Image: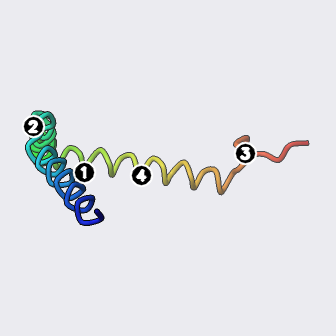
Amino acid sequence: MKFENVKTMGLIAKYKLMKLFSDERGDVNVVAIVVLIGVAVLLAILFKDQIGALLASLLRTINENAEGVVNDPIGGGAAPE
């Protein structure tokens, strides 16, 4: 009796595994994601210098603002009365 149950469970597992590998519903999504990643990498390569300059400018601005806040936390220049 137990052997028959194990055999049946094995056949069910085999069927579900075959169904999993033969399911093709997600293939189009995978191809679209790969194409989008390729486009993003291509754009990053083409605009590498501009992206680097933009990041350097942003980091410089952040650093200057952070130094200003540390040096003058109130922002008024003079101590309040």
Spatial distance from mark 4 to mark 1, Cα to Cα?
Answer: 12 Å
Q: Which residue is mark 4?
A: 60
Badge nearest the viewer, 4 or 1:
1
Residue drawn 13% across the image and 40% down it: 30
- Please, what is the three-letter code of the amino acid marked with disc 4? Arg
Determine whether 25 is above or below 69 in the image. Answer: above
Q: Which residue is mark 1?
A: 52
- Please, what is the three-letter code of the amino acid marked with disc 3? Gly
Q: Which residue is mark 3?
A: 77
Badge nearest the viewer, 3 or 2:
2
Quadrant (top left, top right, bottom left, bottom right) of the C terminus: top right
- Residue 1: x and y, percent? 28, 62
N-terminal label among 2 and 1? 2
- Please, what is the three-letter code of the amino acid marked with disc 1? Gly
Per the rendering, the mark at residue 2 is: none
Spatial distance from mark 2 to mark 4, Cα to Cα?
Answer: 49 Å
**Residue count near mark 2 (Cα–Cα under 10 Å), binned few <14, some 14–19, many ≥20:** few
- Please, what is the three-letter code of the amino acid marked with disc 2? Glu
| SS at mark 2 in the image | loop
